[in-house]
Image (cartoon, rainbow, N blue to C red):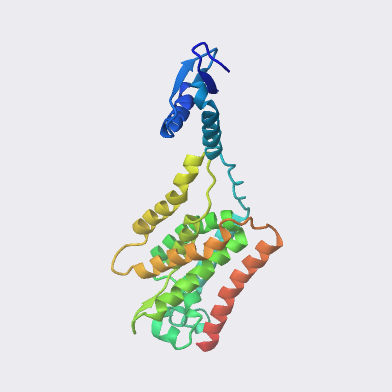
Amino acid sequence: MDTETGWIEVFRSRARGPCEERALTLLAVGIQSAVLPGDNAFLLCVDPENAARALAEVARFQADNRPRPSPAPARLHGGALGSAAAYVLVLFVVAVASSRSLGRFDWVGAGILDGARLRSGDWWRAITALTLHADLAHLAANAGFGALFGGLAARVYGAGTGWLLVLIAATFANLANGAWMAKGQASLGASTAVFAALGALSVHRWPAATRLARAGLRGGSVVAALVLLALLGTGDAHTDILAHALGFASGALFALPLRLRSLPEGRLQRIAAALALGIVAVAWAAALVAG
C-alpha cells in the first residue's frame, strides 16, 4: 500500500517493536526503511525501488522466527507413593533382619560391598549392599531421601520402570566402585541408589510454557541436581563420595534412553516392579546360599 509520503508499506503491527525489529533486518541488507504511524498500527515502509526485496526479507525474517510448536509434556505416572513405600519397607525389613541376625546369619558380612570379594565372584554384593545400613540415622536418611527422589523418578518414568532404572543404575555404580576398591575397604547403604534417582531426574525433559523457559530448563535441571549432589553427597570421612558420584552419573546415563519416551502404564509397570523386587530377592538368596 502506498503511504502519503510515497513509501511502500511492507509490514504493519499494533506495537512499534516488531516493526523496528524488521527495520534492523532490512538495514543489515542495505535497505533503508521508516516506521510510520498509521490507523491503529505502526507501518514499516520502504521506497518503491526496494519494496520487492524488502517484502522478501520480511517474509524470510518471519519464517526464521516463527514459534516452533513445543513437544507435548511427558505424562506423569501414578503409583509413585506406593512404590516409595515399598522401597522403605524393603530397607526396613533388611535392617530388622540384619540387626537381629535373623536365621543366625551375618547379613552385613554377606551383603556388604567388599571390593576384593566382589572381584572374586560375589556379584550379589553390588545389590545387597544397597539395602544395608550402618545405623538408624543412616537408614532414616537414605529411606527419606530415597523415597523422595525415587518417588519422583517413579512419577516421571513409571512406578515400575523408574525403580528398576534406579536399581540397575545403582548396581552398575557399585560394580564400578567395587572394581577398584582397595583391599579391606567396604561400602554399604542405599545412598548410591538415592543419587542414581537424582541423576535420572536431572536429565528428564521437564515441561515449560515458553521457549525461553524451555531453553533455561534444559540445563537448569542438571545444574540443580548437581547442586543437590554437592550438598547431600559430600559429608564426613565416612562418606563414600565416589559411590555417590558414580550413582548420579549412572542414573543420568541409564535414564537418557527413556527421557523422551512415553512409557505405558499397567502391565509393563507391574512387570518392571516385580523384576526390581525379584533382583533384590535373588541377590539376597545368593548371599544366603554362599554364607
Q: Residue at x 64, y 69 (%)?
A: 274
Q: Quadrant of the N terminus?
A: top right
Answer left or right for 257 relative to 243. Answer: right
Answer left or right for 228 relative to 291. Answer: left
Q: Residue furthest front?
A: 49
- Is residue 163 or residue 263 the one in the foreground? 263
- From what the image shows, is residue 92 above or below residue 262? below
- From what the image shows, is residue 76 above or below residue 98? above
Any part of residue 99 in sight: no
Q: For residue 55, what is the image quadrant?
A: top right
Residue 100, horizontal then vertical, whole percent? 47, 76
- Is residue 51 or residue 187 the one in the foreground? 51
Q: For residue 289, what is the image quadrant?
A: bottom right
Q: Residue furthest right?
A: 267
Any part of residue 282 in sight: yes
Residue 227, horizontal then vertical, whole percent? 37, 54
Q: How many marks?
A: 0
- Is residue 10 or residue 152 the one in the foreground? 10
Q: Residue at x 46, y 21 (%)?
A: 16
- From what the image shows, is residue 101 above or below residue 50? below
Answer left or right for 108 relative to 281. Answer: left
Q: Residue at x 44, y 20 (%)?
A: 34
Residue 185, horizontal then vertical, whole percent? 34, 80
- From what the image shows, is residue 212 above or below residue 272? above
Residue 3, horizontal then vertical, whole percent? 53, 14
